[in-house]
Amino acid sequence: MRKALGVVLAALLASISPAAPAAEPGAPLIIAHVAPTSGRFALHAESDRRGAEMAIDEANRAGGVLGREIVLVSRDPSSDPAQAARVAEELITQTRVGFLVGAINSGVAASMSAVCQKYGVIFINTNSSSPSEAVESAHRTKFVFDANAANFNRSLLKFALASRKSKRVLLLTEDDVWGRSSAAASRAYIAEYGGTVAGEVVAPEALPDPARVLEQVAAIPADVVAANISGDNQIKLFAQMDPRIFDRQAWVVGEVDWEELYPAPGTPRPLFGTTWAWNLDTPGSAEFVARYRERYGRTTIAYPGDVTHSAYLATKALLDAIRRAGTTDNHAVIARLEAYRATAAERMQHDGAAMDPVSHHLQQSTYIATWRPNPAAPERGIQILGRITPDQAHYEKEREARLETLADTPHYAP
């Protein structure tokens, strides 16, 4: 009897939980943008917010979604996973947001998405590129729209090792979730392509002494350096380097965002991966750049990059999923997001894209690029050298992702 009463009471409490608000007809739909607005990802956060803002403004000009105006609110979760979890909890239980978009920092993304799963709130990870986001940290309510470092490194390492006889690879690894996960994924590719790991230099997340890190790298003989360094740390590291080193040693970087290039136009870079560039000759790119520059062309980031592109399309995908579902009920919207498909033209890329229903990670075109310093015209520094199809870039370990069942995912209908 006591057990039965407890079950009934638990069901009653769940039905009146503040985490499952019933929206009034026509009430604004609140979407929270969450990304660190200070520290080494500050510019990334601003660029990410701009992409979400552009998509939401377009939707509002067309009448909103399901007849509801969309309101974007911004919160800084910091770069501390524990603080990020508290911010997500507050946004859901007190601000009563409908959805979360953003992230940038992979450790923060993992923390916030775990809270979102607890309440059934859909989290759109617009720009976190740790492979772990689509494997160990995957959730039924989370959808990852950025390519990850495993996607990029698969092609970059194959290219770099093909021309090296001894195939010795040094891992330069940032000591955080993204760096460690990216290095782990790289090890499998190094072995697959006949290489050996000559050693690993682990760089502190804050990178207080990049010169010391480069000394450690130089002390280990290697033909290829696989650098998994992110954010402003890339600027700090490569500003210390003699570009002639790239002539005798192959360096590859799992991912370089526009916000790590455009503000440092005189700093040389090796080969890196990206998902989009403003000068890609693809349908829709020129028009997107024009819309961005009309609005933000006089700001620090005067041209859009891969971060803005990803956030824009990820937010559009969320809003379209709500429209197609005809409801904000999370279970219905999840089903639409799992079935997400986009043409090459819709993605402004060379291939169509599709959401992997197993890992909730978008499979899309990726590009091999490099940077030619051009301080007089920074926007012209990026050079696209090659394209990788979604199948060629696929990270096999994503097949091991285990999402919560829908039955174990609370209903949430903002």
Image: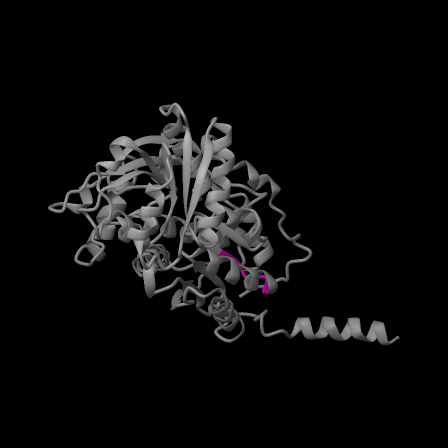
Q: Is residue 279 above or below residue 93?
A: above
Q: Is residue 239 above or below residue 284?
A: below
Residue occupying the point 36% across, 60% down: 206
Closer to the camera in the image, 15 or 356: 356
Identify the image quadrant of residue 299.
bottom left
Residue 100: x and y in percent read: 47, 61
Q: In this view, does 26 lie above or below 311?
A: below
Closer to the camera in the image, 145 or 264: 264
Residue 305: x and y in percent read: 29, 47
Residue 7: x and y in percent read: 78, 71
Q: Is residue 126 left or right of 377 when viewed as pictured?
A: right
Q: Is residue 34 left or right of 325 when viewed as pictured?
A: left
Farthest residue in the left direction? Answer: 376
Say which quadrant the N terminus sits in. bottom right
Whether the magenta-drawn stretch holds residue 121 is answered as yes
Q: Is residue 332 left or right of 125 when viewed as pictured?
A: right
Residue occupying the point 33% across, 37% down: 251
Residue 224: x and y in percent read: 37, 34
Closer to the camera in the image, 176 or 44: 176
The residues colored magenta run: 119-123
